[in-house]
Image: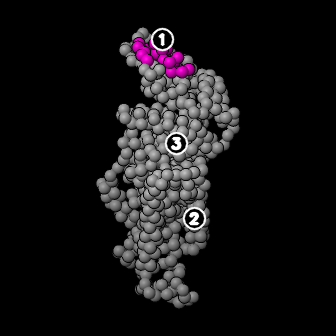
Amino acid sequence: MCIPHFRYFYMQEICEQYRGLTGRKVSFMILLVVLLSGVGLIALSQGASSVGLKDSFAALFEDSGVAHAIVWKLRLPRIVMAILVGCGLAIAGTVFQAILRNPLASPHTLGIGSSAGFGAVMAIVFGGGLYKEYLIAGNAFLFALLSSSLILGVAKLKRSTPETMILAGIAMMFFFSSLSSLFQYMGTMEEVHEIVFWFFGSLSKVGWKEISMASVMILLPIPLLLKWSWDFNLLAAGDESAKALGVNVTRIRMVGLVVASLITAGAICFTGVIGFIGLVSPHITRMVIGGDHRFLLPASALVGSVLVLTADTLGRTLWAPQVIPIGIVTSFIGVPFFFYLLMKRTREYW
Amino acid sequence: MLRVHGLHFRYKNIDALKHVGIGLNKGEVLSIVGPNGAGKTTLLKCIVGIVKPDNGTVLIDGKDTSRMKRLDLARCIGYVPQSTPSKFPITVFDAVLMGRRPYIVWKPSERDLEVVADLLRSMGLEDMALRDFDHLSGGQKQKVLLARAFAQDTDYLLLDEPTSNLDLRHQMEVMEMISGMVKKKGMAAILAVHDLNLASRFSDTVVMLNAGRVFCSGKPMEVMTVENIRSVYGVEATINQNDGNPYILPIRPVGRLKK
């Protein structure tokens, strides 16, 4: 094909501009990685025992000693889990918002958080024995999936419009919250304490075993979601356009819901309810780099990780040795920040 | 060649389409006209496969579309809906690049980017390539959606009221882009239109739908008659000729509408 010179010139210029924009998105992600490493190093050096930055960094590569034990058994698992959980919640939130085409969708507004919470409550009240920790996590996981399959069921019966699914999720949230409240109302002091603790969210009890289980559930589906990022973009343009461009809208909505619920369940079953991350991470990221899911998914995962790790580090250093549960810190930081973004917004939903 | 045979579609116990048949060849523009609720949009959605008809077939170059894979169909027929939701920000370039979806596996190729850039340039959208789609005017948005459909590089293009809500200048520009593309690439386009004069001027064939049935079809001059407009729209009109095209001037509503 022979293209006249001027036409070719314009074409290249537009492509060049577009590539520049892509470059900026990549730089944002690199910046996030640097930020995450920075916060990670700070987190590594902070704690009840006085093992400083230099020592703890050195202890990473040692085989024994007190510093080694503190870093590898206490601090590092916490940091890794914070990164994992933040990544998982943010990815799940981004996917929920994309498939339901709704900026309010998130693991918690869809009722998955509160039903997982109820699962944990049930295990706390009725369970016991040696493996109680795992019983709680397992039950939370099961209930997280239960609520999303209920949403799926409603969507299958009535046509699967995003609105139906959101409303079903909100109904689910109220239902399970009130069930949990009922159990708290009737529970013993000890149980209530444990329940409240779970609903605050905590990273203090995680070890490498929990991390490996959570990472399978959180990291394994990510390549699939990245492959779908193009289809998520098309869903934003409306079901009809997406179908006409060859997207199997019903399937991607159903499978997307299941996968995002799995990720959510994996993220919260060991740590309890960490609110707000799934909702705000995609919004913050969208403000900076726009709505293209090829970049939005990985970038918002990084934003989620930075947020959770920062919140946890603040929570255990601000009033040290008193540790503030992470769920409280994320809400304390997250809510004002979110209001700030809402005030600053230039469009309906950035 | 696109052929629609005996298309029947029921929606909530109402027959939205009853035994509809149309056909058009490459290089032609066909307009579907008719009052609100006549089934124009439903017909387009059935053809492009967004909804499944209860009966009837759609043949593209002799192939039954109900047996085609979704992605293959997306390489044959493009569709521009009447309105597009916009909840999340997207640049104009990305919005047009979406049209390349049927050809992209993991990431868009150099060629995909060039196709988009070339379209933006030729449609006068190059200055807004990186702007947010939502910040455009109605006319500009319609052009971007049109560019997306062109980027899809299909032989057939369906457009649902491409000129509604546009000012005069944009109406003309959009219609000329469509007819220009049809001629240049030997495509075929089906338009659902409200404006009878635009339909007459730009189409080779006009199909007049009434209550889910094809009331009549043919060349604009044959379809746009005083009697047809009276019985389908319930409107008295005068029809003049202008350059061989009928020019319809509606006067007043008459009688009661029969459905």
Q: Amino acid at mark 2?
A: Leu
Q: Which residue is mark 1?
A: B227
Please determine whether, in this image, residue A300 is positioned above or below residue B231: below
Which element type, helix, strand or loop, lies under badge 2?
A: helix
Chain of the residue displaying label 3: B
Measuring 65% from the left and 26% from the top, which residue is drawn there?
Answer: B5
What are the residue bounds of the magenta stretch? B218-241
- Count residues near mark 3 (Cα–Cα under 10 Å), then give few for <14, some for 14-19, many for 20+: many
Question: Horizontal placement of B59 versus B94: left or right?
Answer: right
Tell whether B75 sits left or right of A299.
Answer: right
Return the residue at label 2.
Answer: A219
Q: Nearer the viewer, mark 3 or mark 2?
A: 3
Q: Chain of mark 2?
A: A
Q: Amino acid at mark 1?
A: Glu
- Report if residue B174 lies within the magenta region: no
Tag of residue A238: none
